[in-house]
Image (cartoon, rainbow, N blue to C red):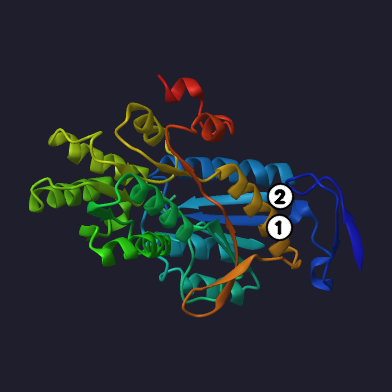
Amino acid sequence: MTILLIACTPDEQIKDVTLPPEAESKSLEEIKIGFSMDTLQEDRWFKDRDLFVEAAEKAGVEVEVTVANGDDVKQVWQTEKMISEGIDVLVVVPHNAESMAAIVERAHDAGIKVLSYDRLVRNAEVDLYLSYDNEEVGILQARAMTELVPKGNYVYLGGADTDYNAHLMKQGVFKVLKPYIDKGDVTVVFNQWTKDWVPEVAQANMETALEVNHQQIDAVIAGNDATAGAAIEALAAYDLAGSVPVAGQDADLAGVQRIVQGTQNLTMYKSIDDLSERAVELAIKLALNEEIQEDRTINNGKINVPSILLPPVPVDRTNIKETVIADGFHQEKDIYQ
Ligand code: BGC
């Protein structure tokens, strides 16, 4: 049966959709999305939470948000509770890519589909993965850094080992660095994960990298802006902040401010507006059992997960205005305060 959904999707377009019989009875007001978040540690996650809730309200669906503060047991428990109390679709940002697999199974047992948001749940039959292209983040970081520093000693401060994004980014970085390494132009003198993305861990790692290499570091690629900021603190202790190029990601306000100040060279802008709006739109489709046109698939160890990956945008001091300011991601007055 074909019906018209009018003015109720996030982009307020009229959509011609075909609903399977079991979904016909659900109206948008009856849909409840469970949004299980790992953390609010970085700036971006506040935006994800608020913009997701805003988009859900705009679409006319209910949403419940939980935040596990980096605790796997808590995230499983919070999600189980949402499933048993009744949600129509689960959107999850896993703290631990592997630990949330059990939750996907539990959701499916209850007839609830699962959208992996930003981070992929591994080894589970995830219905859809929506994120920025994390491998591309790494590729763009490394490409920009090799342009700035074609020869020298590199430090790689990866993200959390438990976050599959960190692995994808690392793949991207090393794909670009490999020919430089093979030629002997680049040496990765330090390469470590950052437990739970904690900046203090990244700072301690950067201090070690500086000490063991007698400060002979020419470039730093960090998993995100929070860890890049921590690396810059460590560089500052040796008066090297600003003279050693550093790359991060997220376009955190502090990261963009450091780009203006000259201590950080690059970040990756990922519009959270686009991500959260898209997520709500797709979560509704999953709840209604509608067809979703994915871009590609990504193997998560168990299946090829239908995936939609948005393109990250590199930001350096030359394009702050056209990117994060033009989009209203940050205000000019806050960046140049
Ligand atoms: C996200 C980054 C974020 C990091 C730490 C990653 O999975 O893609 O944007 O900075 O987690 O929360």
The residue drawn where x is 54% and y is 57% is: 131
Q: Position of residue 261 (x, y in %)?
A: 33, 27
Along the horizontal axis of the image, is 203 left or right of 52? left
**Residue 284 badge:** 1
Asked if the residue at tag 2 contacts the one at tag 1, i.e. Cβ–Cβ closer than 8 Å, the answer is yes
Q: Position of residue 113 (x, y in %)?
A: 63, 68
In space, the residues marked 1 and 2 are separated at their CA atoms by: 8 Å
In the structure shown, which secondary structural element does the residue marked by tag 1 occupy? Answer: helix
**Residue 61 badge:** 2
Q: Position of residue 75 (x, y in %)?
A: 43, 60
Mark 2 CB near ligand 1 (8 Å cut):
no
Between 41 and 324, the one lying in front of the other is: 324
User: Which residue is farthest bottom?
Assistant: 302
Amino acid carrying mark 1 in the image:
Ile
Between 85 and 54, the one lying in front of the other is: 54
Along the horizontal axis of the image, is 287 left or right of 236? right
- Image quadrant where one finds the N terminus: bottom right
Along the horizontal axis of the image, is 27 left or right of 126? right
In the structure shown, which secondary structural element does the residue marked by tag 2 occupy? Answer: loop
Question: In the rendered structure, which disc, 1 or 2, sits on the residue that comes first in sequence?
Answer: 2
Between 236 and 334, the one lying in front of the other is: 236
**Residue 25: in sight, yes or no?**
yes
The residue drawn where x is 19% and y is 52% is: 205
Total labels: the figure holds 2
Disc 2 crowd rating (10 Å Cα; few below 14, some 14-19, many 20+) is many
Q: Quadrant of residue 182?
A: bottom left
Amino acid carrying mark 2 in the image:
Val
The residue drawn where x is 65% and y is 47% is: 277
**Residue 93: in sight, yes or no?**
no
Q: Quadrant of residue 196?
A: bottom left
